[in-house]
Structures are given as structure tokens and as C-alpha cells.
Amino acid sequence: MSGGTDNAAAGSSREVLVWDPWVRLTHWSLAMCVAGAWLTRELEGDWFVWHTRFGYAVLVLVVTRILWGFVGSKHARFADFIRGPRAIIAYLKVAAGERPLGHNPLGALMISALLALLLVQALTGLFANDQVFETGPLFGYVAIETSDRLTTLHKQTFDWITAAIGVHVAAALFYLWVKRDNLILPMITGRKRIEGASAADGITNLPPSASTAMGSWWLAVLIAALVAGALAWVVMTAPEAGLYTF
């Protein structure tokens, strides 16, 4: 009897909601905004205004995602996936059979690094200049020497972001092709399939139901609106300045 039960459990599977709509929207929106910011900076002509707008979007998305990491759905919270060195080492030792519902410890490192890098990139861009004509919206608050240093950091940070994105994409493809664990599709649909005993008997760390995740959608929108409003106020009240001032 127990063997039949074990076989049934091993063959069972079901889908559970893991990533709420805001997490998915943030993920893909950041990808598009970073690409847009890079492209509009490389194009010739009057594209700087769009570079700035993409930078604003990145800043609002990142700050909102950080706040969502404290008040969002279960697997969106930092407490659910940020782990210390021991947990990371333990995961590496058993990684072949370990498939956490949310971010695994290595994925948590990448998410944290990307959020930190994007935050630095967006903030430094507010004070940067191109040493010719264009300046960030908060350029008037700092001395030209400070702006130059922040501009250098702004450029260097983008190199780190590019490298991190490369590792992030390579890791996703590695999990897909080598470990047969599709991490990309759940970031589109929000759902992951669990198999075996976990699906048959239930698991203790199930994410919130679809209705709960959707019910908190208004909170994410409210946070984003407040962050965007605060940024707009800071930009609009900043002193006007240009490179010619110095």
C-alpha cells in the first residue's frame, strides 16, 4: 500500500502561484528600460531626454521593488530568499536536487546585486554630465568636480550591470538546458510546477493564493505612484544649472 502511495505521489504534480504581477512587471520593465537607456545614450541626435526618462523609470521601479521586498507577497520578500554564506554553501552541495519555489540562494545574490547596481546607476545619473552640454536633473545641487566623479561612477556602474546581466542570462539558460529547470516561464506566467510528494501531500511554504497576490496589486501601484511623485517633486524643485554656469 505504501509503495502505491509513494508512486502516486512521485507521479503527481500541480502548479502554484509564485511570482505576483508586480514582480513580473518589474522584471521585464527593468530589462526594457535598461536597454532603452543604453540605446538612447548611444544614438546620435536629441535622444538624451529619453535617456533621462528611462533613468527615471529605472529609479522608480527599483525603489518600488525594494519596498515591495518588505511588504509584498511571500516570495517577493527579501526575508524569503536572502540567505547567509552557510545557506549558499549548503545549496551548492545539494543543488542538483534542490528546487526552491522562490529565488534560490545564488539567484538571491544576483537579484540583490542587480537592484543595488541599478539603484546606484539611476541615482548617479541624476547628478551626471556629459562634459559638453547635457546634465542630470539634479546637477545644480553639486559642484562640477563632484558631478564629474559621479559621472565616472555612472559609467563604471553600467559596465558592472552589463556583466551582471550576462551572468544572469547565462544562469537562466544553464538551469533551462542543463538542470531542466525553467526559470524563465514562471517569470512570465507567475506559476511554477511542483512534482512528487510536495504536490501530493502539500508543502509548508506555499505562496499566497492568486486572489491574495492580486488583492495586493493596488498596494504596489500605490507605492510606485508615491515614489514617482516624490521623484517628480525633487526634479521639479531642483535648481536650474548647466555646464556653462561653471
Image (cartoon, helix red, strand yellow):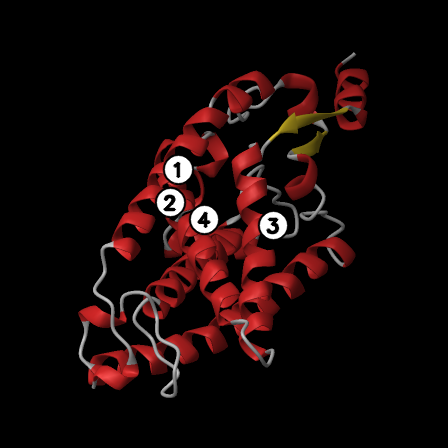
Where residue 128 sits, quadrant-wise, is: bottom left
Secondary structure, mark 1, is: helix
Q: Which residue corresponds to the image point at 64% horizontal and 34% vertical from the top-left?
A: 190
Q: Which residue is mark 3?
A: 28
Q: Residues within 10 Å of mark 3 (few under 14, many from 20)?
A: few
Distance CA(mark 1)–CA(mark 2): 5 Å
Distance CA(mark 2)–CA(mark 3): 18 Å
Secondary structure, mark 2, is: helix
Q: Position of residue 76 (x, y in %)?
A: 47, 37
Distance CA(mark 1)–CA(mark 4): 10 Å
Q: Considering the image in quadrants, where does the C terminus appear?
A: bottom left
Q: Which mark is residue 61?
A: 4
Q: Nearer the N terminus, badge 4 or badge 3? A: 3
Q: Which residue is mark 1?
A: 225
Q: Which residue is mark 2?
A: 228
Q: Is residue 79 visible?
A: no
